[in-house]
Image (cartoon, rainbow, N blue to C red):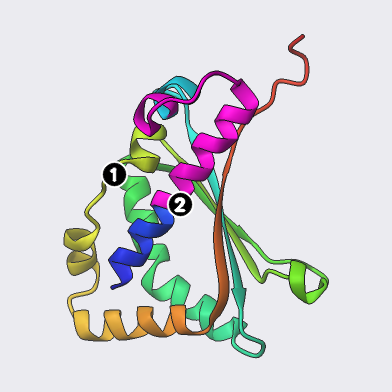
Amino acid sequence: MIAARRHAAHSRAAVVLILLCSVIFGGPAMNASAQTKQAVPDDRPVTIEYYYKVKWGFADEFIRLFKKNHYPSLKKQIEMGRILQVSAVTPRFHNTEDGRWDYRVTITFKNAAVAFGDFDAEPLNRELWPDQDTFKREEQRRFEILLAHWDLPLGTLDLDKK
């Protein structure tokens, strides 16, 4: 179930990226695979921001579970070369409820194929968390305390380009 949610989130991210690239780079509509390849060359890193809005009073639990059950996977993927960098921030001040988010995790992937391609995390998860029952229960809890989660693929704009 968690893997399905992640896959759906990555699929939504790919659609957003395609739409964003279409707006930025223009051009006729084409199939998703061709448009992604045209808009983001395979050799260029791809950065995606992942926003998490947590139920009031549960932010500490969320980040504890994230650091325990997701961050080690991201670090392992850095070792594997899939991911170039992972960082996280939290706002210093609060915002309006409709614009509020609690954590932003920014991941820079090696390239578009890695960022949006199929990646089977199950073998990695089994290696990192042999107690799969606890892992799955805690990951379920991490998603239960979320109010919202969204992914924002970033495009680079060359402000000096005429």
The part of the image, by quadrant, that contains residue 34 is top left
Residue 71 horizontal side relative to residue 99, left or right: left
- Residue placed at 37% from the left, 47% from the top? 78
Q: Residues within 10 Å of mark 1 (few under 14, many from 20)?
A: few
* Element at label 2: helix
* Sequence order check, earlier mark of 1 and 2: 2
- Residue placed at 47% from the left, 48% from the top? 13
Residue 72 horizontal side relative to residue 60, left or right: left
Q: Give how far across and how far down residue 143 sits, in percent.
A: 45, 78
The magenta stretch spans which residues?
11-35
Disc 1/disc 2 C-alpha distance (Å): 24 Å
Q: Amino acid at mark 1?
A: Met
- Residue placed at 66% from the left, 71% from the top? 102
In the foreground, 9 or 137? 9
Could you say which disc has been placed on residue 151 in the image?
Answer: none
Q: Quadrant of the C terminus?
A: top right
Q: Give how far across and how far down residue 11 sits, in percent.
A: 39, 50
Inspect the magenta stretch and tell me whether residue 23 lies in it: yes
Disc number lying in front (1 or 2): 2
- Residue placed at 26% from the left, 49% from the top? 119
User: Is residue 19 placed above or below 89 in the rendered structure?
Assistant: above
**In the rendered image, which residue does mark 1 sit on?**
80
**In the rendered image, which residue does mark 2 sit on?**
12
Which secondary structure class fits the magenta region best? helix
Inspect the magenta stretch and tell me whether residue 111 lies in it: no
Name, please, the residue furthest toward the front.
29
Q: Give how far across and how far down residue 31 sits, in percent.
A: 38, 29
In the foreground, 61 or 114? 114
Q: Quadrant of the N terminus?
A: bottom left
Q: Amino acid at mark 2?
A: Arg
Residue 91 horizontal side relative to residue 145, left or right: right
